């Protein structure tokens, strides 16, 4: 992934929103349109353990991104992905539903008897309504054979690394801020 | 080449979809601020110059936006003005309020070499000393004067004394997990899943709540206790990071007030309390029954801080509530093994690490030695 930063200056990183993942990446992939930027590799049905993704999937920080063929079999070499909760709809900023996101947790061991890990996968799918706009655009390009159900886009991370919501205060910062509230404990400044 | 200097060309953002400006502290200091101080050209005009006295925090997001993508944090260069011509204090007042420094400055390292400092400031509306605290936080980074003779000067070739007024700042809004969860924009499923995932992870949000309760119930004691504990903590530098993580870990698993106890993660005690077996700290208290609400936690904290550790004995056999170093062996290896890239942990890094990387003698004998002047 050497050229993934497109000559962007230091500090730019791949932190896509849900909408971007669905609209800019998954829809275009499904419509067989060239993805720009073409950074997310297609691992097809390769059953990777999450720690094997490094070097295969696109890595940004401690998150890995890859396309996969849609499958019901999420068993890997050393474990399996188990769904967590229900599908979560993905809306565009115009409140149009374009896809869904399903969470999975990785278990090590035999299916139904595995040990839970803190590896989490978010699997993005296109929803039927979301594919209609792509259908139009692909039809314009004379490509009627588009299978929207074929691809999913996955983001894998260890849950304690899930700090995608921008900067945070450190533990100690919070303590000091709380002290400010109490008694104006001030240090020389 | 000249068009490279602009973030957008003909209204189109030059930042490809999915990419955000998320610089590390090292990048902010070593690349951006060093270039700024040296008056070098910076590719893409990502960090603007801002007159902090003329800009309210809520206007910063418009002024400092990068492309059209949603942002959680904003960056700018600012030139520090002295409040009084002869003094060293900085004037950070705006029309609507003022930025007030909080805590101690954090030393920023690059490959174990000290390169700069980070100051944390909070925006207060109104006028000192009666300002009203807001959720706006600023991290102000400055280059370390001691490094000017090495990195900055060799790169910049300028007189550091005349340019030391430039700082690079990151502004963001403090997160409030309760608000986020109650927000109508969050669908119930997504909020529920996030709650569940949060129970698997360590976050600062719960600590926020703990501090809130601590502050309410015991004002004086907490001040003394925390100061004492920080002093104590400096003697146990290598284990602090792990222990604070552990502390957070424990509280992260406490039920939230609004949290539904039927979630699968609460039923799964073995996962929610991984240290139960090794540390033995929760052995005689069922975590679900023993701490079923914040009132119980309130009592626990209050009793601990008053030195009556009857309740806490059950949960924390070691007396040192805040920065205990027992159990460390069992947990350090666990926690460390998950930390593959230290640079990724910048955002959540504990400030006390700055002491670790100083020499042990100076950190224990002179704990305030590196405060800013």
Image (cartoon, rainbow, N blue to C red):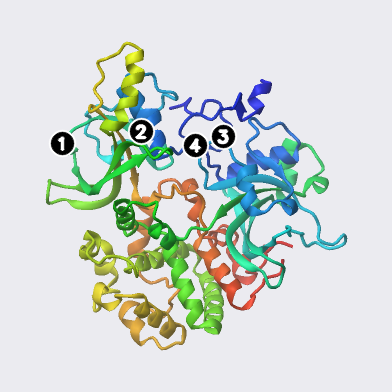
Label 1 and label 2 in one chain: yes
User: Relative to B337, does residue A62 appear above or below in the rendering?
Assistant: above
In the picture of the structure, the residue carrying the numbered disc 2 is A22
Quote the CA–CA distance across marks 4 and 1.
32 Å
Dot 3 and dot 2 within a common chain: no
Whether residues under marks 1 and 3 lie with C-beta atoms below 8 angstroms apart, the answer is no
At which x and y percent is residue B321?
43, 76
Choose top left, top right, bottom left or bottom right for residue B356.
bottom right
Q: Give the structural element (helix, strand or loop) at label 1.
A: loop
Percent x, y for residue B204?
45, 61
Q: Which labelled disc corresponds to residue A13?
A: 4
Task: Say which element carries label 2.
Answer: helix
In the picture of the structure, the residue carrying the numbered disc 3 is: B67
> Could you give the CA–CA distance between mark 3 and mark 2, rounded to whole angstroms?
19 Å
Q: Earlier in the sequence, mark 4 or mark 1?
A: 4
Of all chains, the one bearing label 3 is: B
Q: Tell if the residue under mark 2 belongs to the same chain as the one under mark 4.
A: yes
Name the N-terminal-most of marks 1 and 2.
2
How far apart are the alpha carbons under marks 1 and 3?
Answer: 40 Å
Quarter location, residue A189: bottom right
Q: Around disc 3, counting alpha carbons within 10 Å, would you say few (fewer than 14), some (14 to 19), or many (20 or more)?
A: some
Q: Is residue B151 visible?
A: no
Between the C-alphas of marks 2 and 4, the distance is 18 Å
Chain letter, disc 4 residue: A
């Amino acid at each position: 992934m050497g050229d993934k930063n497109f000559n962007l200056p230091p500090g730019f990183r791949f932190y896509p929103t849900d909408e971007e993942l669905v609209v800019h990446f998954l829809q275009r992939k499904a419509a067989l349109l060239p993805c720009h930027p073409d950074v997310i590799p297609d691992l097809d049905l390769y059953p990777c353990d999450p720690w094997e993704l490094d070097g295969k999937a696109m890595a940004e920080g401690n998150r890995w991104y890859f396309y996969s063929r849609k499958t019901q079999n999420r068993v890997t070499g050393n474990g399996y992905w188990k769904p967590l909760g229900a599908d979560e709809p993905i809306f565009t900023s115009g409140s149009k539903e374009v896809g869904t996101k399903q969470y999975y947790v990785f278990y090590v061991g035999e299916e139904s008897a595995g040990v839970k890990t803190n590896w989490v996968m978010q699997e993005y799918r296109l929803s039927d309504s979301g594919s209609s706009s792509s259908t139009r655009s692909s039809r314009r390009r004379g490509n009627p054979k588009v299978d929207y159900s074929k691809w999913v886009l996955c983001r894998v991370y260890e849950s304690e690394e899930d700090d995608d919501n921008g900067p945070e205060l450190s533990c100690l910062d919070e303590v000091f801020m709380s002290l400010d509230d109490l008694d104006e404990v001030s240090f020389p400044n | 080449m000249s068009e490279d200097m602009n973030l957008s060309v003909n209204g189109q953002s030059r930042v490809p979809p999915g990419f955000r400006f998320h610089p590390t502290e090292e990048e902010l200091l070593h690349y951006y601020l060093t270039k700024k101080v040296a008056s070098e050209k910076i590719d893409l005009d990502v960090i603007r110059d801002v007159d902090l006295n003329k800009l309210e925090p809520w206007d910063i997001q418009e002024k400092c936006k990068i492309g059209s993508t949603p942002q959680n944090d904003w960056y700018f260069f600012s030139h520090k003005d002295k409040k009084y011509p002869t003094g060293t204090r900085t004037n950070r007042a705006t029309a609507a309020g003022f930025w007030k420094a909080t805590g101690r400055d954090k030393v920023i390292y690059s490959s174990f070499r000290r390169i700069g400092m980070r100051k944390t400031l909070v925006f207060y509306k109104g006028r000192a000393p009666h300002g009203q605290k807001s959720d706006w936080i600023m991290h102000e980074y400055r280059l370390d004067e001691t490094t000017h003779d090495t990195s900055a000067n060799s790169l910049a070739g300028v007189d550091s004394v005349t340019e030391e007024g430039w700082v690079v700042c990151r502004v963001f809004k403090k997160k409030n997990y309760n608000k986020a969860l109650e927000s109508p924009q969050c669908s119930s499923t997504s909020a529920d899943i996030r709650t569940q995932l949060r129970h698997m992870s360590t976050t600062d949000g719960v600590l926020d709540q703990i501090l809130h309760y601590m502050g309410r119930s015991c004002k004086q004691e907490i001040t003394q206790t925390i100061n004492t504990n920080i002093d104590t903590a400096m003697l146990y530098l290598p284990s602090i990071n792990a222990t604070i993580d552990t502390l957070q870990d424990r509280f992260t698993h406490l039920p939230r007030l609004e949290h539904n106890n039927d979630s699968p993660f609460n039923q799964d005690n073995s996962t929610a309390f991984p240290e139960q077996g090794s540390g033995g700290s929760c052995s005689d208290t069922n975590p679900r029954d023993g701490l079923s609400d914040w009132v119980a936690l309130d009592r626990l904290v209050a009793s601990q801080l008053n030195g009556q550790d009857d309740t806490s004995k059950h949960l924390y056999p070691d007396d040192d509530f805040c920065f205990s170093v027992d159990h460390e062996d069992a947990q350090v290896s666990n926690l460390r093994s998950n930390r593959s890239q230290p640079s990724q942990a910048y955002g959540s890094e504990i400030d006390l690490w700055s002491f670790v990387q100083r020499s042990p003698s100076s950190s224990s004998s002179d704990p305030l030695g590196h405060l800013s002047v």
